[in-house]
Image: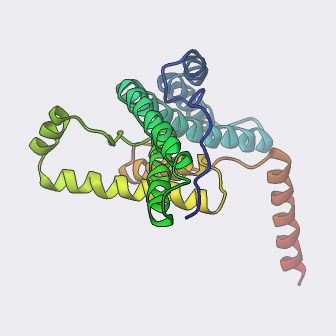
Amino acid sequence: MKDVKRPQPYHNNGNSNNKNSKKSNANNKKGDSQGKIKKRIRDLKRALKNGPKTAKAKIESERRLRALDYELGEKYIDDHQEKLYQKYRTVKFLELKKAQRRVKTAKKAVEEAETIDEKEQNKLQEALNKARINELYILHYPKTLPYISLYASNEEKTKQNEKGKSKIEANKKLQREILDKVQQILDKGGDMNELSKEYRERYREMMVEKGNIPAVQPLVDEHQDQSAEQNQTVTENDDFFA
């Protein structure tokens, strides 16, 4: 049985209520609001409509407009993540403490199991690995998703039952999916931040499809972009003289 590596301490990841994470979330709130970004977009579109003085000015304005459209989408997602953080940070903090206690208990049981048979040792190791996977689940739960509790109380279970069987089954399926992805990332020695990145991109695609944010990609480096435009011009000239 492969031993799961011990995760890093729970701090500065936007999911706890310690001082470091508060500073981190305060930093994330910096920058223009959606309203200010939208105003800048309107002003820029108006300037483009009136006609820039030069072709170069038009290209630069169009680039700024694309950058602002992307920035607006990012801010929309950031604001969504912040709402979820504020809503679930207490329950996640409490569940993390419970998960850490279970890891500690399971680890102690494994360390004290040297005298028992191999089958029992494997069972204890599996329990430890499961406890650590649960700890990582809480630590790296996708920030764009409403949190699905690992240790729901009877009161919470009653509330879930009121939402209907289909909702409960959907939550169980999503929770299993995330737990499996945590295990897969561990098995390949990957970065746990991959999890939030994947689900953030999924959320972006969903919001683009709904028309809530513009369907634009981040701009490449300006020099790369200019080089690409120059290469395209050269190609067009070559085709012309061919």
Position above or below: 213 against 125: above
Residue 9: give x, y in percent of width and height.
60, 32
Which quadrant, please, contains the N terminus? bottom right
Give 92 or 228, whichever is nearer the viewer.
92
Residue 237: give x, y in percent of width and height.
87, 71
Residue 140 in view, yes or no: no
Position above or below: 189 against 143: below
Position above or below: 215 against 98: below
The answer to whether residue 28 is left or right of residue 220 is left
Figure quadrant of residue 98: top left
The answer to whether residue 87 is left or right of residue 240 is left
The answer to whether residue 192 is left or right of residue 81 is right
Residue 102: give x, y in percent of width and height.
43, 39
Figure quadrant of residue 150: top left
Residue 177: give x, y in percent of width and height.
40, 59
Number of marks drawn: 0
How is the structure coloured here? rainbow
Furthest toward the bottom, the residue is 242
Residue at the spot x=43%, y=54% of the render? 178
Give 72 or 53, whichever is nearer the viewer.
72
Residue 59 in view, yes or no: yes
Residue at the spot x=85%, y=72% of the render? 235
Residue at the spot x=59%, y=48% of the render? 192
Which quadrant, please, contains the C terminus? bottom right
Residue at the spot x=54%, y=62% of the render? 184
